[in-house]
Image: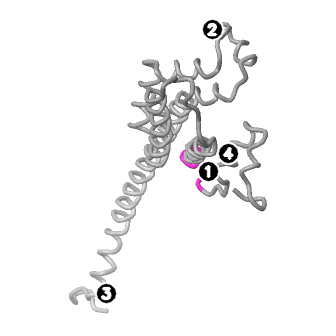
């Protein structure tokens, strides 16, 4: 090769590659770092949202847990002594704190959880309307307990999925088996 001859195309490409490679690696590393940082921030926000959701879900479920507690079990807490579970649960649902938790649920709860909660509350509102229409309010009862259990089970199942059990295969009434000793009477041939 003659030292006086002009550089060839291959020499230009080699020189450009020598300069461009470190710059490309630097840019790619910067982009990778930015993506990793953004991903970590999203993960942290999702974890915080998950924790907030669990706290709201617990608040929303408290009156329903009380409904499945015996009056004797309820009297273990000083604030509930001498009260019946249905009244304590009703008072909780009508409280300002519960309404605030419901508003939080509307903001941070998953769509499926919020829909299931709305369905459950609409069911209870319809029962309350029936009570007001009857001659004696105490005469209004849950006509089909499976309806109420179904709505509550669907809420629990939606919460289960929302907090990370997306692949669950449980039926919504299975979510209540630990609470109700004779719930399996609703099964036919071993299935709900």
Q: Quick check: 66 above or below 149?
A: above
Which residue is label 3 attached to? 10
Q: Nearer the viewer, mark 2 or mark 3?
A: 2
Quarter of the N terminus within the rendering = bottom left
The colour scheme is one colour
Q: Secondary structure at mark 4?
A: helix
Mark pair 4, 3: CA separation: 70 Å
Task: Report if residue 163 lies within the magenta region.
Answer: yes
Q: Residue 79 — which label? A: 2
Residue 54, visible in the rendered structure: yes
Residue 45, visible in the rendered structure: no
- Say if mark 1 contacts mark 4, CB within 8 Å: no
Residue drawn 29% across the image and 74% down it: 16
Q: Secondary structure at mark 1?
A: loop
Q: Secondary structure at mark 3?
A: helix
- Say if mark 2 contacts mark 3, CB within 8 Å: no
Which residue is label 1 attached to? 165
Residue drawn 45% across the image and 39% down it: 122
First to last magenta residue range: 159-166
Q: Residue 175 — which label? A: 4
């Amino acid at each position: 090769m003659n030292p006086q001859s002009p550089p060839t195309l291959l020499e230009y490409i080699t020189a450009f590659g020598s300069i461009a490679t470190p710059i490309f690696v630097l840019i790619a590393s910067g982009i990778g770092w930015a993506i990793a940082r953004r991903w970590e921030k999203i993960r942290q926000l999702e974890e915080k949202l998950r924790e907030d959701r669990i706290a709201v879900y617990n608040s929303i479920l408290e009156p329903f847990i009380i409904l499945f507690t015996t009056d004797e079990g309820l009297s273990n807490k000083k604030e509930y002594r001498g009260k019946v579970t249905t009244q304590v649960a009703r008072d909780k649902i009508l409280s300002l704190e519960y309404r605030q938790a419901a508003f939080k649920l509307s903001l941070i709860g998953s769509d499926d959880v919020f829909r299931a909660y709305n369905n459950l509350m609409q069911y209870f509102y319809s029962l309350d309307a029936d009570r007001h229409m009857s001659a004696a309010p105490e005469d209004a009862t849950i006509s089909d307990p499976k309806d109420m259990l179904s709505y509550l089970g669907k809420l629990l199942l939606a919460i289960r999925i929302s907090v990370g059990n997306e692949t669950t295969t449980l039926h919504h009434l299975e979510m209540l088996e630990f609470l109700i000793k004779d719930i399996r009477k609703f099964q036919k041939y071993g299935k709900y």
